[in-house]
Image (spheres, rainbow, N blue to C red):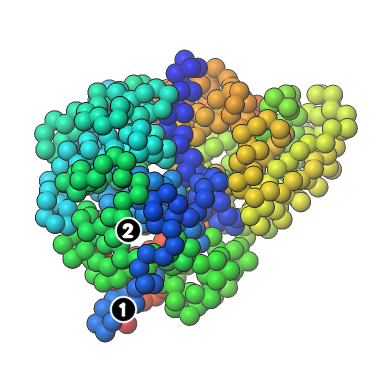
Amino acid sequence: MKKKTRRFAGALLAAAMAMAVTACGGTAGDNTAGTDNTAGTDNTAGTVGTGPATAVEGEKIINIGVTDSLGGVNPFAIDQTEINKYALDLMFLPLMELDKDLNFQGMLADSITTEDNIHFTVHIDDAATWSDGTPVTAHDVEYSVLRYASPVVGNTSLLLYAFEGTDDATGFVEEGATSMAGLTVVDDKTIEFTSKYPMALTTFQNSYGRYLHILPKHVIEKFGEDELTSVDWFNQPDVISGPYFLTGYDPNHYISYTANTDYWKGAPKIDKLNIRIVDGSQVYAGLQSGEIDITQHTMTAIPQEDYESIEALDNVKVVYGSPVTNQSAFIQTANITDARVRQALVYAIDRQQLVEQLLKGHGEVIDGFLSSASPFYDDAVKPMEYNPEKAKELLEEAGWDGSQTLRFYVNSGDNTFVNGVQVIVAQWAAVGIKAEITTVDLATLMTVAGTTDYDIMAVQYTYAPVDPYPDVSWLLGGEGSWTGYYNEDVAAALEGTQKTSDINEIKGFYSVVDQKMQEDAAMFSVYVISAQGAVSNRVTGAEPSVYGFFNDVHKWDVTE
């Protein structure tokens, strides 16, 4: 059981990690750990195009403000960070996407079903067409998957070794493969995926349905596998399935689009769209001046100190997102072996005070991994209260003499938590725990996390509310994980989540996990953030949301 659960979790981790760890502080900005945010190997370094799109008379334009740099626009050559995923979504629709209420909404597919959590049937919407009028088919899906799994392409952002026909170690098929055991084209609009292990429908939908960008076979097959990561076609693709054509970009400044008037879901009302990449400190001024029309919770890191100023603007509406980004602290249990000491670390912190003072109340305190945003959240799992006396009792029982200094690593880019950690360390000191804070950039923090050379390390981490399994299973996967923690009951509960589609059953399994985190404290949540988004009053049909932001972008409009 242990081997299978951990191996399957590893198969999904690469896709999950790219969207889970937050690169900048103060908001829930999902970004990959340690990614070099330049155009890099897809032959798109520097600026492509002449600058951000500008509207001519009679045209409508919207500017979206984000604070994450773009890694590139070639799906074969980039890690799928939040901004990269959405930049691609506008051109090449995924199979499905979550809506703002965490329901799966069909994009290219109109259904994904399974009867046994092994075979997954994907049906492509009968109306789906490429911009040149060619129907989108199951053959496009098959061809795209085979190219993602090509050892020549070598894509590592969407590993596919959970499926039959791929190598267990690499997730690749053979070079030049024209078929794969885990893919069966049933008819022009239907394809079946076959996994090696039981997989929950939500896991398939979230980890693969949302991240497989389907490409036009009749165009892509013209390029050799060795060309796909560098071909110039992706800089301005002329055949797309989504609502907008890419017209130009600079990976550190902007991404510009023009409407696909032949979009099969309906011609966009906005003629031109810009994603403007700015520093977090520039967001307030951009919203105030109207240079930015809308910000989104997971791509726009608005400094906490600007929240109230943005709320006071009379030309924008502020929308706080659901609590999804967890300020997680991971304890290396190989170094802090006594669960009583780990529990004392949690009891000693006034976490609600941190929510009120650091987040101005825009967040919540939980134990374990699941926040109230998840359909699997169990409100019967009450967070451990602030109880310094209890902490002292536990330390005394454990024989803690106070001589040890814990090594606590923190992301230097998370300004809000860098301030909060001073309070945490002071509260620990009050019960007899000494800790030394080391602040490092995210890339260094991820390097440290890959070792056991720390006692505690904290980072913002987004556990997908509908599919926390890949992250949780890996994080609690024993030796080599960020916690070094493994428990048979936890492993069995996590494996159970993959064998059923019953929400209440899945909820029960995750409750076991969160309760064990209270008992064993291999990790703890400091707080979960509800990030701020904002939208100009001139924009209609669009509202910031943690998920589903671009699902109906073709319906966005402006009033002048």
User: Can residue 248 be seen by looking at this rendering?
Assistant: yes
Residue found farthest to the bottom: 57
User: Can residue 527 be seen by looking at this rendering?
Assistant: no
3D distance between C-alphas at marks 1 and 2: 21 Å
Secondary structure, mark 2, is helix
Height in image: 230 above or below 262?
Answer: above
Height in image: 520 above or below 302?
Answer: above
Q: Locate residue 499, reporting x and y percent.
A: 36, 23
Q: Is residue 486 left or right of residue 277?
A: right
Q: Is residue 78 left or right of residue 558?
A: right
Marks 1 and 2 in Cβ contact (< 8 Å): no
Of the residues shown, which amino acid type is indicated by label 2? Asn
Q: Locate residue 546, reporting x and y percent.
A: 43, 54
Which residue is at a point 31% across and 78% down the rendered structure image? 55
Which residue is at a point 37% across and 64% down the rendered structure image? 48
Q: Quarter of the image holding residue 168?
A: top left
Of the residues shown, which amino acid type is indicated by label 1? Ala
Mark 1: give few (<14), some (14-19) or many (20+) Cα within 10 Å. Answer: few
* Residue 55, label in figure: 1
* Residue 235, label in figure: 2
Q: Nearer the viewer, residue 555 or 59?
A: 59
